[in-house]
Amino acid sequence: MKFNAIVVGAGPAGSSTAYHLAKSGLKVLLLEKETMPRFKLCAGCLSARAVKFLPEGYQHLFLNKIRSGRLGFRGVEEVRVKTEGEVAYIVDRSTFDHFLAQKAQEAGAEFLNGEFLGFDKEGAGYRVFTSRGSFLTEFVVGADGVRSRVSKLLGFRKKYYRSVEFFTHGRMEDEVLIEIGLVRRGYLWVFPHGEGISVGVASAGKEDLISILKDHCKHKGISYKHPKGWHIPLSENRNSLHLGRDRVLLVGDSAGMADPLLGEGIYYSLWAGKLLSEAILKNPSEPLQVYEKLLKPLRDDILYAGKIGRLAYSFQRVSYKMGHGRALKEFYSVLTGHKSYKEVYRLGWFDFLKHLTKEGFFRIFKV
Ligand SMILES: Cc1cc2nc3c(=O)[nH]c(=O)nc-3n(C[C@H](O)[C@H](O)[C@H](O)COP(=O)(O)OP(=O)(O)OC[C@H]3O[C@@H](n4cnc5c(N)ncnc54)[C@H](O)[C@@H]3O)c2cc1C
């Protein structure tokens, strides 16, 4: 059986790519090793700017609508900043991903519950080996997540945030809490999750995340449950995104597309899936070149989120102080799509310098 494209992984990146390709009339196979709906460790926070990439009929997926944010420092100080409207939504990843995979199928993609094992070049295309047999295709799309086998077969390696998270009872409704000052590079979160909450911590450092989470829950009276752990890609510079080779293309976490400030990856997965399908349709013989070009704004966003992240996590006390002023509002404007990380980075410099102490001013040259 010959396909135009085989998309490996039915997370947001794979389903978005499959949806757009199938909608344009290509013969697409969406391959997923888990039975859908499947569990995915994730806080499920979807920034408002992501909504434009969702297929019709998504409204029922929003468990909570975020209208307020709290920024905490070391679990002892806190500032709350209300938003002007909804800046983000909380989704349950099993239902959300299932919905996207179904939309890809409605658009014409064929779904196969099987595991990707590898591929070989064959003729002008590829033979893809799966636990359910082998298939011929013109394009292979690796959307198989942060531990992507497709990306490994191409020889790419990536850096990670380590993260742990659990779901428990608690009431938060329409606000999120981000605690800084607890890990060297990253943050702890308490987000609403429908009627309950999700609590987690992510860090690029080597701390004992489980102890930090446990201590924080004890201190705040949160009912602790043993967390699960997973990785979030950490893309720090222009070369950290791996887009593929020839007609084997990567998208979402498998390409390293999560923002290094917050670890937000769903938005970039949905966006990049659309861009990748455009690249394949525009230039089927050399899609990688077009993909590179189309991705420029996405790449810039991740790059500048990384620049902000490096400063914000190196000077966490300063970041907290800035949270009282304009900074959180600026940040909300990124989540709603009114500003890019690049604009916020440029605008934020003066504010940042104003808040730096003399000692911090000299430390900045080391960041
Ligand atoms: C603890 C935690 C909290 C997070 N919170 C947020 C958040 O609040 N907001 C946000 O935007 N992002 C968050 N993220 C990041 C987000 O989860 C990812 O960026 C996002 O899921 C990436 O989507 P994807 O489609 O690239 O990969 P995934 O969602 O990981 O999907 C990959 C799919 O590929 C399948 N697969 C893997 N290998 C194979 C194979 N060999 N054969 C067939 N199928 C395969 C997997 O089963 C999976 O279904 C969080 C991540 C973690 C770990």
Image (spheres, rainbow, N blue to C red):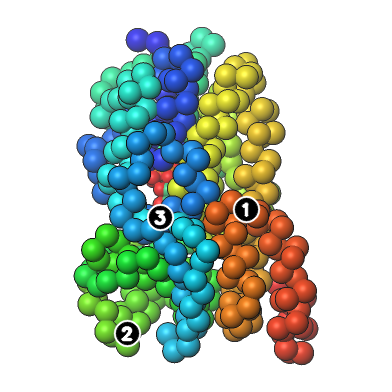
Image position of 74 with respect to 335: above or below: below
- Residue type at mark 1 is His
User: Which numbered disc, 3 or 2, marks the residue that appears first in the sequence?
Assistant: 3
Task: Indicate the quadrant containing the N terminus: top left, top right, bottom left or bottom right.
Answer: top left
Query: Residue under circle 2?
Result: 220
Q: Work out whether 194 lies above or below 317.
A: above
**Labels 3 and 1: the sequence-earlier one:** 3
Question: Is 80 left or right of 330, judged from the image as shown?
Answer: left
x and y percentages locating residue 340 in the rendered image: 65, 53
Q: Residues within 10 Å of mark 3 (few under 14, many from 20)?
A: many
Q: What SS does tag 3 mark?
A: strand
In space, the residues marked 1 and 2 are separated at their CA atoms by: 34 Å
**Dot 1 crowding, Cα within 10 Å, few <14, some 14–19, many 20+:** few
Q: Residue at x 44, y 64 (%)?
A: 67
Q: Which mark is residue 68?
A: none
Question: Vertical placement of 319 versus 157: above or below?
Answer: below
Residue in the image at 57% along x and 32% along y: 275
User: Separation of disc 3 and disc 1 at Cα?
Assistant: 17 Å
Q: Position of residue 65 (x, y in %)?
A: 38, 58
Q: Is residue 106 left or right of residue 252?
A: left
Residue hosting label 3: 89
**Which numbered dot is residue 338?**
1
Indicate the amino acid at tag 3.
Tyr
Q: Quadrant of the C terminus?
A: bottom right
Q: Amino acid at mark 2?
A: Lys
